[in-house]
Amino acid sequence: MITFEGVTKRYPDGTVALDDVSLECPTGQITVFVGTSGGGKTTALRTINRMVEPTGGRVLIDGQDVRERKPAELRRGIGYVIQHAGLFPHRTIEDNIATVPYLLRWNKKKARDTARELMERVGLEPVMAKRYPFQLSGGQQQRVGVARALAADPPIMLMDEPFSAVDPVVRAELQDEFLRLQDELHKTIVFVTHDIDEAIKLGDRIAVFRTGGQLVQVASPEDLLAHPADDFVAGFVGQNRGIRSLSFADTAELSLRDDLVLPVTATGADAANLEWVLVVDEARRPLGWTRGPEVAGTLAEEALAPVGATFEVGADSVRGALDAAVLSPAGLAVGVDGGGAVVGVTGGAELLAVPTHGAGHRRPGDSGKPPADQDDPAPASKDGVSD
Ligand SMILES: Nc1ncnc2c1ncn2[C@@H]1O[C@H](COP(=O)(O)OP(=O)(O)OP(=O)(O)O)[C@@H](O)[C@H]1O
């Protein structure tokens, strides 16, 4: 657990970068610092590894004041990833990743073996080990940055806008892989971003900072969307927070219709009273849509409209189901089980009737650990800061 106790940072020119910030970053979870530019996110992050020394208050790691630790020794237990990766240009990829192991005087073989293992973990081809950073794409360099931060297996990772410099597609890939990795590793992660969508996707807890170094709210993504503490936070999370909050609604709670799902052997008579019919094969895999009243012979003879996107019941969120409904020619989302067999279909108002709270689903790659705020049920205080 990383604890900020009334942390203030006032620079000599009078700038207040952090103003009496108190919060907790729980062990094994991702805490995201988000907020306006100049809000103090990076400053707060850097007080953890003593790159910035507060002028007031203190930062504790597992109850110990970080000032009791020597900076160099402290930092070896804290991985640090920054925007543009910050790799050493004249060192190969494997040697970049092995930076901390070399500092810790591991023998070269062990350090390089670890580097190779980590390359695989973060999705880098072995052939890249001997390359130099300039021979890698921006996204690949960020992966190297993450691997380097993980090399000495530190319990804590500080990540400052690590995925900001890459295009949106690569960024989404890096985020998904990062979540998968965290599912295995359970590091205590503090992650800075200015992007609220990234914060909602990655965070177990989100801390919102405002100019002047004020911490405005600390909450789970669900709570932040449902109950922004004030107009600033509401504005920051955006107008479409209602739609976003569907990411936390569980499709296991949807009531799915089975009567619109018919096998290829069904006939026009079976379909006549149904505006749309989803045709499935013998394994109940979806084949396509057709309009019921237009079916003449059996469904096998029909030219079908494409199924469109499907959602996995209980694994995908209601937002995913809504997406599938919008993309479906019938306006109905097709729910499938883990094996791809159709469970049922749903659309429209039913999708919006599912509560967005208390749902088990959080995000892709989640291992089923409890939502962040179950560990810390402290209610938000009147200023919205729950720590
Ligand atoms: N060495 C310094 N001297 C004076 N002011 C500083 C110094 N370093 C940072 N600041 C100021 O402290 C404030 C907080 O900066 P910080 O980098 O923590 O913000 P941030 O929320 O990370 O912003 P961004 O999203 O733009 O990176 C800013 O107003 C910044 O100008």
Image (cartoon, grey):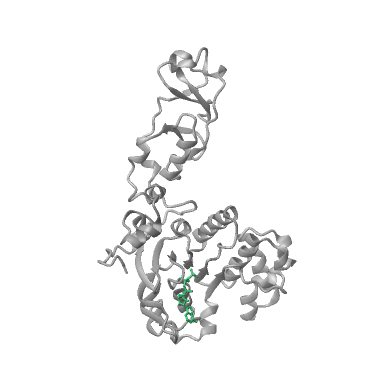
Left or right side of 347 for 304? right
Tell me, yes or no, if residue 337 can be seen here.
Answer: no
- Using the image, determine if residue 65 lies above or below residue 125: below
Residue 92 position within the rendered picture, expressed as x and y whole percent measured from the top left: 72, 70
Toward the viewer: 200 or 49?
200
Tell me, yes or no, if residue 42 can be seen here.
Answer: yes
Residue 336 position within the rendered picture, expressed as x and y whole percent measured from the top left: 47, 36
Residue lying furthest front? 13
Residue 261 position within the rendered picture, expressed as x and y whole percent measured from the top left: 45, 26
Left or right side of 368 for 96? right
Q: Number of callouts in the render?
A: 0
Toward the viewer: 208 or 151?
208
- Using the image, determine if residue 356 lies above or below residue 158: above
**Which quadrant of the figure has residue 227?**
bottom left
Name the residue rendered at 34%, 67% in the picture.
Answer: 216
Toward the viewer: 200 or 119?
200
Toward the viewer: 42 or 61?
42
Name the residue rendered at 73%, 64% in the picture.
Answer: 135
Quadrant showing the N terminus: bottom left
Residue 126 position within the rendered picture, expressed as x and y whole percent measured from the top left: 71, 61
**Which quadrant of the figure has residue 272?**
top left
Quadrant showing the C terminus: bottom left
